[in-house]
Image (cartoon, rainbow, N blue to C red):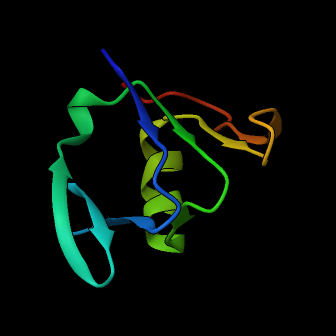
Amino acid sequence: MPTIYIRDPDTTLAVDTSHFTLRSKGRRIGRIPPMMMERVILDHGVNVTRTALDRLGTLGIPVTFLGREGRVQARLVAPWKPR
């Protein structure tokens, strides 16, 4: 399964009832089914909603946050992977 790498600082990762969504300037620019995600990497300036973080954790999908220089600033990992 692929790594989802979101680089555009104007992008927000959100979630709807069944898919993750990518939004830019208030409009949806893409959808990602959860079964297509193994891990998520967010570049500096990319936003993620609390609901999306909750869903990623529930699915056991780790999230990595990168800083300005592209170095890892933080990583969120669920304590288990239910899949």
On the rendered structure, is 37 left or right of 60?
left
**Residue at x 45%, y 71% (from the top left corner):** 51
Using the rendered view, name the quadrant where residue 80 is placed. top right
Compared to residue 45, the image places residue 64 above or below, namely above
Question: What residue appears at the point 55 percent right and 60 percent down from the top-left corner?
Answer: 46
Residue 14 x, y percent position in the rendering? 36, 67
Q: Quadrant of residue 77?
A: top right
Q: How many numbered circles does the render carry?
A: 0
Q: Residue 62 location in percent, x, y? A: 58, 34
Residue under the image location 32 percent in, 72 percent down: 24
| Residue furthest to the bottom | 26
Please identify the residue farthest to the top as the structure is shown. Answer: 1
**Residue lying at 74% horizontally and 35% vertically, measured from the top left:** 70
In the picture, residue 32 is in which quadrant? top left
Quarter of the image that includes the C terminus: top left
The N terminus sits in image quarter: top left
- In the displayed structure image, the side of residue 15 where residue 51 appears, left or right: right
Q: Nearer the viewer, residue 39 or 78?
A: 39
Q: Is residue 23 above or below residue 78?
A: below
Q: Residue 44: x, y in percent?
A: 67, 53
